Image (tube, rainbow, N blue to C red):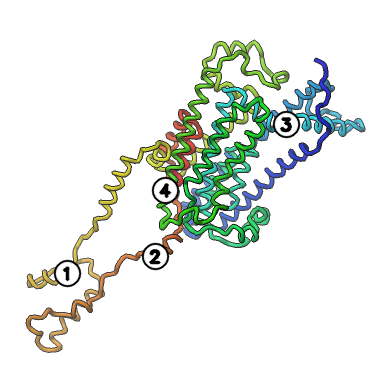
């Protein structure tokens, strides 16, 4: 093949973009680690019991290990994908030794100008190749690969809604940074970090100034922004119809993504797909207060939460079925080939025989070996599903709550059960009722209630000794003090509406893992897709308190 001349002049902006990408990942990870440490230092004394300390020692390393594993896999697959792209570019341009990403001369710097030459080649490669959009397009251009990629996109929408609801409820700082890491690294890395944040903030963090570490404080909104956009009151929630409009934009972009592959509009559609996921986080901050509702009690918003996650689950399931059918019927020959196939280490005869003998489902599952970019997405899906099941087992989320947040119109039987339980709880439990005055006048002898307080006993003694001090009691009049002067029974404390809005609902971790909920989450991920399973688990998380 004749060498292809360089298509673009040398541009250093793509090289700077790669450097900014790496620096942003390091900075955001450090900032989130600092905020997690701040959350740990802000734990109340009630969270320092022996059982809860033992739970944190057991659970924090588990999710931290999953986050490190996700980061390691993302780093490995990114290097493999970039190296394959560079090799293909070097081969097309007829450069010497295209099979090596970094030459021996560049490592040992023996020739005088070899380092500059290789850096110039890398700059030319980044100028001619859009490595980020290439990786996304390789995943989206074939139905079998998009079956994996769409699950990450759908699960990211559900994760964004969880960040919006639980992040605001618990006052977790840097919630936008978790979503940024989901796009810059992978979704499983960001999710496991947010699970750690939820473990470190079982109750809402207090509002404080300068409570964060310096790297995290740089990401906080400035005082000017806070004056222009004042914070919302407690228990304020945005109108659900606004969030539904954001979901329509998200799913519209995801639906168009495979049709835009191999066209000039793919970059714009892919960018909009990522940008729309930030709407659930941005809209509650920038909209006016009158675009939402201040609920009297935090549980009053559960109905809208349930509706939102049901819509996420239903739409995710429909899109997952669509991509599954498209992947199963896609039977074109050599569908595993891509733009970097010239240097991909395939055994052509073995791969062709496997393509002919395996089932359609096997071809979809085997698409993760087509390219390192597809491999990265497939491993991210598996790691997200593993973390999702472990998290729901740790939280011991009620199976009914998960199903209610997954299946529309399921709560008919649930409402009946709640009504029965409410009627049972509303019946006052009176073991020994206080004897009334009418009963005392009818019987010459009354038994003293065992649970009588000392105050009432003193009152009865005073009333019985009163007539003996004054002489004979007045006939026809009851003995003792008048009824209006008798000590009234203590009433249950009823907080005012302003105090109810300030309630801080804490979470309590169970002592044992609930593997039944984990099995349900894994089953939903296997049959309904990761997006629907994430909607059920995250919706159950938001309505289970």
Judge whether 320 appears above or below 292 on screen. above
SS label for mark 4:
helix
Provide the residue designation for mark 4: 302
Q: Which residue is rendered at x = 15% and y = 69% of the image?
A: 436
Using the numbered discs, state the Cα–Cα distance from disc 1 to disc 3 in whole angstroms: 88 Å
Provide the residue designation for mark 2: 496
Provide the residue designation for mark 1: 448
Using the numbered discs, state the Cα–Cα distance from disc 2 to disc 4 in whole angstroms: 21 Å
Using the numbered discs, state the Cα–Cα distance from disc 2 to disc 3 in whole angstroms: 59 Å
SS label for mark 2:
loop
- Front position in the image: 219 or 384: 219
Provide the residue designation for mark 3: 130
Indicate which disc, 3 or 4, sits on the residue closer to the N terminus.
3
Q: Which mark is residue 543?
A: none
Q: Nearer the viewer, mark 1 or mark 3?
A: 3
Indicate which disc, 1 or 2, sits on the residue closer to the N terminus.
1
Q: Which residue is rendered at x = 55% and y = 34% of the image?
A: 252
**On the rendered structure, is 310 left or right of 195?**
left
Indicate which disc, 2 or 4, sits on the residue closer to the N terminus.
4
């Amino acid at each position: 093949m004749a060498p292809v001349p360089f298509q673009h002049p040398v541009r250093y902006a793509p090289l700077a973009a790669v450097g900014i990408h790496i620096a942003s990942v390091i900075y955001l990870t450090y900032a989130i680690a600092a905020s997690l440490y701040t959350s740990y230092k802000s734990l109340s004394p009630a969270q320092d019991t022996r059982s809860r300390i033992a739970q944190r020692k057991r659970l924090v390393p588990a999710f931290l290990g999953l986050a490190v594993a996700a980061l390691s896999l993302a780093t490995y697959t990114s290097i493999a994908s970039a190296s394959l792209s560079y090799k293909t570019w070097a081969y097309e341009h007829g450069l010497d030794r295209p099979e090596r990403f970094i030459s021996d001369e560049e490592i040992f710097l023996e020739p005088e100008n070899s380092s500059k030459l290789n850096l110039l080649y890398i700059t030319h490669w980044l100028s001619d190749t859009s490595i980020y959009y290439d990786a996304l397009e390789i995943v989206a251009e074939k139905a079998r690969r998009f079956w994996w990629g769409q699950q990450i996109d759908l699960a990211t929408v559900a994760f964004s809604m969880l960040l919006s609801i639980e992040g605001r409820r618990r006052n977790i700082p840097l919630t936008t940074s978790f979503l940024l890491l989901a796009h810059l690294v992978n979704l499983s890395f960001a999710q496991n970090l947010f699970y750690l944040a939820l473990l470190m903030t079982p109750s809402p963090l207090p509002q404080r100034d300068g409570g964060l570490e310096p790297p995290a404080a740089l990401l906080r909104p400035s005082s000017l922004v806070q004056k222009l956009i004042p914070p919302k009151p407690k228990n304020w929630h945005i109108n659900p119809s606004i969030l539904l409009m954001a979901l329509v934009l998200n799913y519209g972009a995801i639906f168009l993504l495979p049709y835009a592959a191999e066209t000039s509009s793919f970059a714009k559609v892919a960018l909009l797909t990522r940008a729309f996921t930030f709407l659930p986080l941005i809209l509650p901050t920038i909209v006016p207060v009158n675009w939402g509702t201040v609920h009297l009690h935090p549980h009053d918003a559960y109905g809208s939460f349930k509706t939102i996650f049901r819509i996420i689950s239903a739409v995710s399931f429909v899109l997952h079925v669509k991509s599954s059918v498209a992947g199963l019927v896609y039977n074109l020959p050599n569908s595993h080939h891509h733009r970097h196939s010239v240097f991909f280490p395939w055994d052509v005869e073995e791969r062709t025989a496997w393509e002919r003998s395996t089932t359609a489902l096997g071809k979809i599952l085997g698409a993760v070996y087509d390219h390192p970019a597809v491999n990265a997405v497939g491993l991210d899906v598996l790691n997200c599903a593993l973390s999702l099941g472990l998290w729901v087992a740790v939280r011991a989320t009620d199976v009914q709550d998960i199903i209610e947040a997954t299946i529309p119109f399921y709560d008919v039987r649930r409402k009946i059960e709640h009504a029965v339980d409410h009627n049972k709880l509303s019946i006052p439990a009176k073991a020994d009722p206080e004897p009334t005055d009418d009963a005392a006048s009818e019987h010459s002898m009354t038994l003293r209630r065992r649970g009588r307080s000392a105050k009432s006993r003193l009152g009865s003694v005073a009333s019985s000794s009163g007539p003996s001090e004054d002489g004979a009691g007045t006939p026809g009049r009851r003995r003792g003090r008048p009824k209006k002067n008798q000590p009234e029974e203590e009433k249950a404390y009823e907080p005012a509406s302003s105090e109810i809005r300030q309630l801080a609902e804490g979470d309590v971790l169970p002592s044992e893992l609930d593997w039944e909920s984990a099995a349900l989450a894994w089953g939903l991920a296997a049959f309904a897709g990761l997006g629907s399973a994430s909607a059920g688990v995250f919706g159950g998380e938001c309505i289970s308190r």
